Each structure stands twice: as structure tokens, then as C-alpha cells.
Amino acid sequence: MLHPSYTDLINAVNSEVEPGEEPIVQSRYSIVIATAKRARQLIAGDKALVDAPSNKPLSTAVEEIHETLVRVIGEDDIPEDEFEE
């Protein structure tokens, strides 16, 4: 079993969404993609924001997202000049 669970991660990411607004993450797929992107950033040399019990980038990324130290944004929130062509 994954700890924290997908549901816990989704709830953590959506915890800052105002009532009535659309949640940022709505599926397991979305949380997996967000976690994988953060893990790739860690592999590329970004500093970890938590002291994870594991030195594995994916475990660190999961912990950072669960503790809401990393902000997950939807595609609609990305400025157009940051889209890759």
C-alpha cells in the first residue's frame, strides 16, 4: 500500500482550493504526472524541500506534495510564454 495514499495526496493538493472552485487535481493520473515532474526536477539537481527518510527522488517528491511544500498548478494556470513549443 502506498503511504500516503492517492486520496491523501489529492486532498492535500486540493486543500487550498476555495469551496465552489474546480479542484486542481481530479484523478490519480494527474497526481502521478505531478509527482513524476517533481521527481525529475530533483534528479536534475533541485534541492529537496523535506528531509525524506529515503534518498529516492520519487519518495521525496511524494512527501513534498503531501506536505504541500510544492504547489501543483493546472495547465490553465501556466503563462503562455512558459509553454514549450
Image (tube, helix red, strand yellow):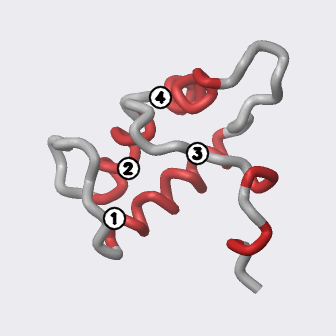
Q: Mark 1 points at which residue?
A: 42
Of marks 2 and 3, the one in the foreground: 3
Asked if 13 appears above or below 40 in the picture, the reply is above
Q: Name the residue under label 3.
A: 72
Q: Mark 4 points at which residue?
A: 5
**As shown in the figure, which amino acid type bears the numbered disc 4?**
Ser
Q: Residue at point 72% right, 48% down?
A: 74
**Residue 6 visible in the snapshot:** yes
**Residue 1 visible in the snapshot:** no
Q: How many labels does the image show?
A: 4
**As shown in the figure, which amino acid type bears the numbered disc 2?**
Ala
Among the two numbered marks 1 and 3 on one chain, the one whose residue lies closer to the N terminus: 1
Q: Distance between the residues labelled 4 and 3?
A: 17 Å
**As shown in the figure, which amino acid type bears the numbered disc 3?**
Val
Q: Distance between the residues labelled 2 and 3?
A: 12 Å
Q: In which quarter of the image is residue 48?
A: bottom left
Viewport quadrant of the N terminus: top left
Residue 52 in picture, x, y percent from top left: 20, 43
Q: Distance between the residues labelled 1 and 4?
A: 21 Å
Q: Distance between the residues labelled 1 and 2?
A: 8 Å
Q: Residue 66 carries which label?
A: none
Viewport quadrant of the C terminus: bottom right
Q: Distance between the residues labelled 4 and 2?
A: 14 Å
Q: How far apart are marks 1 and 3 (CA)?
A: 15 Å
Q: Residue at point 44% right, 33% down?
A: 68
Q: Residue at point 31% right, 48% down?
A: 59
Disc 2: CA contacts within 10 A as few (<14), some (14-19) or many (>=20): many
Q: Mark 2 points at which residue?
A: 61
